[in-house]
Amino acid sequence: MQRPPRPRRFRFAARQRPRFQGQSFNRLIPNIMTLLGLCAGLMAMRFALEARWEPAAGLIILAGAIDGLDGRLARLLKATSRFGAEFDSLADFLSFGVAPAMILYLWTMHDYRGLGFVPCVMFAVCMSLRLARFNATLDAGPVPLTGPAPKPAYAQSFFTGVPAPAGALLGMFPIFASLAFSGWGWDGLAGAVRHPLFVGGVLIGTALMLVSTFPTWSFKNFKVRREYILPLLLSVGAYAALLVSEPWAALAAAGLIYVSMLPFSLRSYIRLKREAEAMIEPVAATPAEPPPAA
């Protein structure tokens, strides 16, 4: 006798969440930071058109702070990419090349008209060349077919020329000093640093330093001796207090401090180069043995 068929039991499969193609939000944070730095440079140019020099100069410093964070965040989150490097360079060119040149031209260099425009153009062009040279080093592998040769080990802690944020800081030094002197009531000094001849000299000097091969510390692998740690911390604390109380004077002092460090950077580079060359022992070539006689 056959048994009656059992009723079919339907099992409903667990509903799966749809998978979206794309990147995680964490990997987009460095690009978002770069975009904010680009917007800061654009807003600085807008304030310059309205003759609002203090917010214009402050936004350039904000762009520099963002530029110092986005690369480190990308390495920390393992979100480095070729797109991010190119986007960062384009944002740096606008924020540190075009925006400072435009601000300084509208601030004082327009008094000399065409002649006053030449240092501003030279500064922006040299900034673009400096960033293009930096991008070319990204493609340099162990044996590059084109582009510059890779840096030796002792030169990895040095930039070639002044980096873009530091170049913007040095180029904006006259406006920082003028705002500080005006706040103290020193109108004579404020007018002196605002003179187009002084501003033009600063722009040309900074432009030449941008495209030079002068080695400058990158501070990535910079080590501090134990006996210098406490004075360094105290100096940073004093500078932070000055930055809060007198921001324009602190920014102008930062430019002077950076310029005063350049000779020490060159001395350190030369010392490391000599030590690296001394470690290379010449190897005498052994003469080839004559073939045995037949």
Image (cartoon, rainbow, N blue to C red):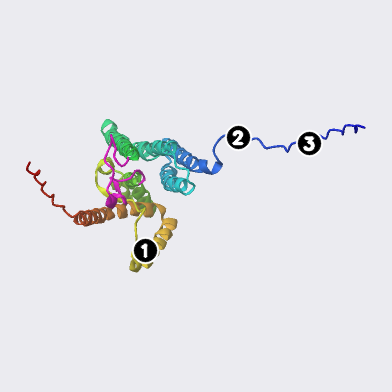
- Residue 54: x, y in percent? 42, 45
Q: Are marks 2 and 1 in contact (CB under 8 Å)?
A: no
Q: Is residue 184 magenta?
A: no
Q: Which is closer to the viewer, label 3 or label 2?
A: 3
Secondary structure at badge 2 equals loop
Mark 2 crowdedness (10 Å alpha carbons): few <14, some 14-19, many ≥20? few
| 85 relative to 202 in the view: left or right | right
Q: Determine the residue positioned at 19% across, 56% down.
A: 278
Earlier sequence position, callout 3 versus callout 1: 3
Q: Amino acid at mark 2?
A: Phe
Task: Name the spot of residue 217 as percent of width and height, x first.
Answer: 31, 52
Q: Earlier in the sequence, mark 3 or mark 2?
A: 3
For badge 1, the amino acid type reads Leu
Residue at image mark 3: 11
Amino acid type at mark 3? Arg
Residue identified by numbered label 1: 232
Q: Residue furthest front?
A: 294
Q: CA distance from mark 3 to mark 1?
A: 70 Å
On residue 20, which mark appears? 2
Dot 3: what SS?
loop
Task: Please name whichever residue, 121 or 135, is drawn nearer the observer in this view of the structure.
Answer: 135
